[in-house]
Every structure is written in C-alpha cells, then in structure tokens.
Image (cartoon, grey):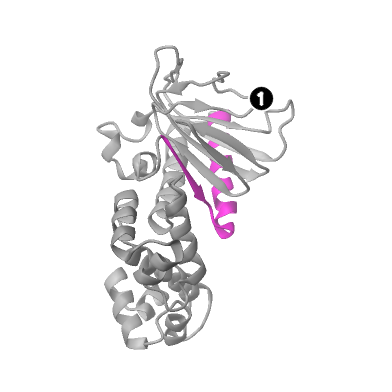
Amino acid sequence: MGRSSDIPLVGFVHSPVPIAVQHTARPSALPRVRGPHTHDFLTLVHVVRGAGTYRIDGHTWPLGEGDALVIAPGAVVEHPEEPESPPGELWSVVFPAEAVAPATWQDHPLLAPFVGRHRGGGQRIGVPPADRATWRAHLVDLDDELTRRRDGHAEAARAHLTLLLVALGRLVDDVPAESGDPLLAAVFAVVEERFAGRLSLRDVAAAVGLTPGHLTTVVRRGTGRTVQQWITERRMREARRLLASTDLPVAEVGARVGYPDPGYFARRFRAAHGVTAATWRAGSGTP
C-alpha cells in the first residue's frame, strides 16, 4: 500500500520516559485517529482476553486470545471500530525507537521483531499459554511504574519494557511468525502437525503441492530459513519443553520429537545448543 500525503502522521509526544501504555480497563491515554493513519513510534499489542482486528498496510490481522501484534513505524494502520465498553482485555505499548535504541534501531536485537521477515508493517505472534501470565505481569508492572511515577520509575519502566521485548524476541526466534502469506501459513501448519514423526522437505512440498526446489526458494525468501531448519527448530523447541517439564529419559524425548535414533538426536541437540541434552536439562533446574 503506497503512502499518500493525505494520510495523517501521529507523532509520539516525547517525555523523560518515552513509553506509553493503554489497556481496556481505563479510557485511552494514547492518540487515536479515525481512519487510516501512520505513526513514528513502535507499537506492541497483546490480547489477554477477547478478540479484535487491525488492518496494516492493506492486510487484515484478526487477533485472538494470547496473540501479540507488532506494528512498525511508518505502517499505515486502521484500528477496528470499538464499542463503548470493549469486551475482553487488550494492552498496547507504544514507544519511540530511542526508548530502547539510541543508534540505528533497525539493527537493534530487541527491536528485530518490528523489522523482521513479516509482511508489510505488521507481524502477529502467538504467545504460548504457559507464558501469558508472565506477559501480563510485565504489562501490569510497566503500567504501574508509568502511572505511580515513584522514585526510579523511569529506570524501572525501561527495565520492564526490556523484559517484554526479550520475551517477544525469544518467541520470534522459536516460532515461525505469520507472514500473511497463505502458502507459508500452510507450510508452518504441516510442520506443526507432523514434526513429531518422519518429516522431510519432500513431505512438506508434497503436502502443499509444490516441488521441493520451488518450496525451498519460497520459504527461504519469505523467512530467511529453509524448511528443514524450521522442522529442526520446531523439534528442538518441543525437546526443550519436554526436558524442562518432564523426567522422560533423553532418548525418549528424542523419539517424541521425531528422532528415533538416540545418537542422531544427541548430535542434533548438541549442534543446536552447544551442550548435551542432559547438560541442558541440568541447567534448566529440572532434576
């Protein structure tokens, strides 16, 4: 969607603490513009309960419980029409880049999700159920510091924002964020459904009706990774979960994530994490 001179620009009102929070428990303290507009700040939206829809650079993003949405500066945004008393619980955090990155913010690791491989100016990321209470706690604590303005609130607010962005970045590293491309969504759906069994590039290509070579090109261009790398990442994420939350033998963990050969699983895990699965488990605090 091209930029037009009649699309209004919403600027951040800079302050000693350049962070603002909005949630559905009180009237909005953030600038609201009806119709398409753009802004010069970064936006992170998180849905705790309920649902909503945003339109960004011409693409519609429906949001449900647990979803996070990042919006890059300069994106053309259309907010949904809201009732007088919106149902559910939704949080928004807005901040200019200098709140986190005084230099070139596009290269800052904490802000990578805002300029990643997503389509246009938006990216939707599902927060796992196990992480949602922590996300909400970060948002509540951030809002509390900005509202009560006690001694040291500026430093505390930046610390809470940093923790939230670290959590966001870890999700983006571990989970293939949605790109708005139906083909990529189909690829990730196949990986999610079948990663625990025998699954190869050829299997995924057959499932989505493309040749392996064509699929490799599409996925690498759209995500920066190969299909096999996404399969491995999904398996390793599940392996970490099982190692940390169960007392299953390491060989059984490998079998459950698609590596029936214990030796091969051991090599893959060490290559991905730099330590053995047993060492990783010991470091996670799990007996």
Q: SS class of the residue under badge 1?
A: loop
Does residue 285 show up?
A: no
Tell me which residue sits at (35%, 35%) in the image: 100
- At x 43%, y 46%, the residue is 179
Q: Residue at x 45, y 30 (%)?
A: 57
Residues packed near mark 1 inside 10 Å, few (<14), some (14 to 19) or many (20 plus): few
Measured along the vertical axis of the image, is residue 133 above or below residue 74? below
Task: Report the quarter where the N terminus lies.
Answer: top left
Q: Is residue 254 above or below residue 25?
A: below
Give the camera-side residue of 191 and 51.
191
Amino acid type, callout 1: Pro
Tell whether 143 sits left or right of 110. right
Residue 4: horizontal and vertical position, in percent?
Answer: 40, 16
Determine whether 215 is above or below 26 in the image: below
In magenta stretch: residue 127:
yes
Identify the residue under disc 1.
Answer: 27
Q: Quadrant of residue 52?
A: top right
- Snapshot quadrant of residue 276: bottom left
Q: Which residues are magenta?
A: 121-148
